[in-house]
Amino acid sequence: MSLTWPWALTALLAFPLLLGYRWWMRRRRRREAVRVSSVALIRAALPGRSLWRRRIPVWLFAAGLIVLATGAARPHASVPVPASSATIMLAMDVSGSMCTTDVPPNRLTAAQQAAREFIEAQEDGSRIGLVTFSGVAGLLVEPTTDKKALLAAIDKLRTGRGTAIGLAILTSIDAIAEVNPEVPPTGVEVPAAGPETPGQYHADTIVVLTDGRNTHGVDPTTAAAEAAARRLRVYTIGFGTTEPAPMVCTRDQISGDAAFRGDQFGRGPGRGRGQRFDEATLTEVAELTGGEYFQAKDAEALSRVLRELPNSIVLQRQDVEITVWFALAGALLVLTAVGLAQWWNRPGYSRASSRDG
């Protein structure tokens, strides 16, 4: 918990001052007390309240003053809140290596299926955008709540040459800036910023899925610094295994700029490739932006990662002022103290309670 006006805590001095005043009044009454020789007369004159009935209102009143003084300092707390208006940008790698068959039938098909499941699992009204990247990055579907449009775009993914992870992050930033006026586009200069507390990030999030390392365009860490300056988190997923495997894509999965021979992409059936994504860079990108890095070696692992992502994205912690709760709690304590004191001091109550006891 943090305080906006910590100097307001000086109001807590009211508590010891009240205790001092109460002590002074009791001492003064003792000095002015009349000497009575009969103990029976003293007992008859004193109220029949027990010790705890005298102290409870005092301590409740004191607790109320402390809570009210803390509320005057405008406390803030990091609490989990739903981000129903958040945008999730899914940036998918469609480089030629996505035809590798170490994840059957190939990485691209497995990624498409996992992306479909991710989109279908989101609640109605969730806003999702789709960016694809190979040697260049492009906004395939701007942030939308239309699941059918997203699923149709997923089905039409085509591979290309090269891998531009940094450009994919920058393209995602610009897509978020179109729907969130608080996020400046990449053309606007923003002071550099490192990782900040989770409560200071925007709800909008970028998810990068890749099986390769950056070969074109902006360095991913440079793009990550731009995202961090705009308080956008980037989650990264490294997809694939280290096992060499042939690269096989169907005709529908290959774009016109890719080398193509029969049903084989790239090097042909006799050659294979394994895991080549840059784990160190993907981890650094996530850490720079307050996100997280995941590794998915197979289709099941990828589906699980995407399925669990909303727990971090949709429900997040934000810095919220909780002054009103302190004010309500403090007022309740003070009113309870005053009410109990009035009730136990009302005429006839002390004698009645003494007879009942």
Image (tube, rainbow, N blue to C red):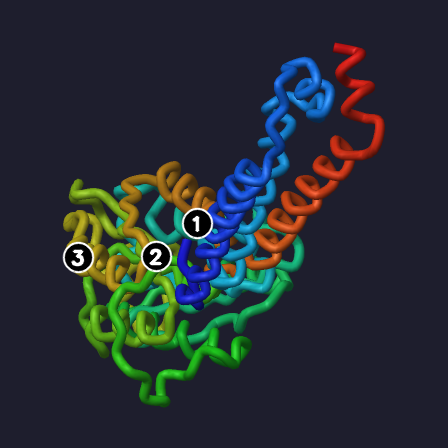
Question: Which secondary structure lies at badge 2?
Answer: strand
Real-space Cα distance between discs 3 and 1?
23 Å
The vertical placement of 141 against 314, above or below, is: below
- Of 54 and 223, nearer the camera is 54
Q: Is residue 154 left or right of residue 193?
A: right
| N-term-proximal mark, 3 vs 2 | 2
Q: Amino acid at mark 3?
A: Asp
Question: Which secondary structure lies at badge 3?
Answer: loop
Q: Which residue is mark 3?
A: 278
| N-term-proximal mark, 1 vs 2 | 2
Real-space Cα distance between discs 1 and 2?
10 Å
Q: Where residue 317 sits in the image (x, y, percent)?
A: 46, 54
Are dots 1 and 2 in contact, CB under 8 Å? yes
Q: Amino acid at mark 2?
A: Tyr
Q: Is residue 108 left or right of residue 321?
A: left
- Quadrant housing the C terminus: top right
Q: Let me know if residue 263 appears in the view.
A: no
Residue visible at 57% across and 52% down in the picture: 326
Residue visible at 22% across and 43% down in the picture: 241
| N-term-proximal mark, 3 vs 1 | 3
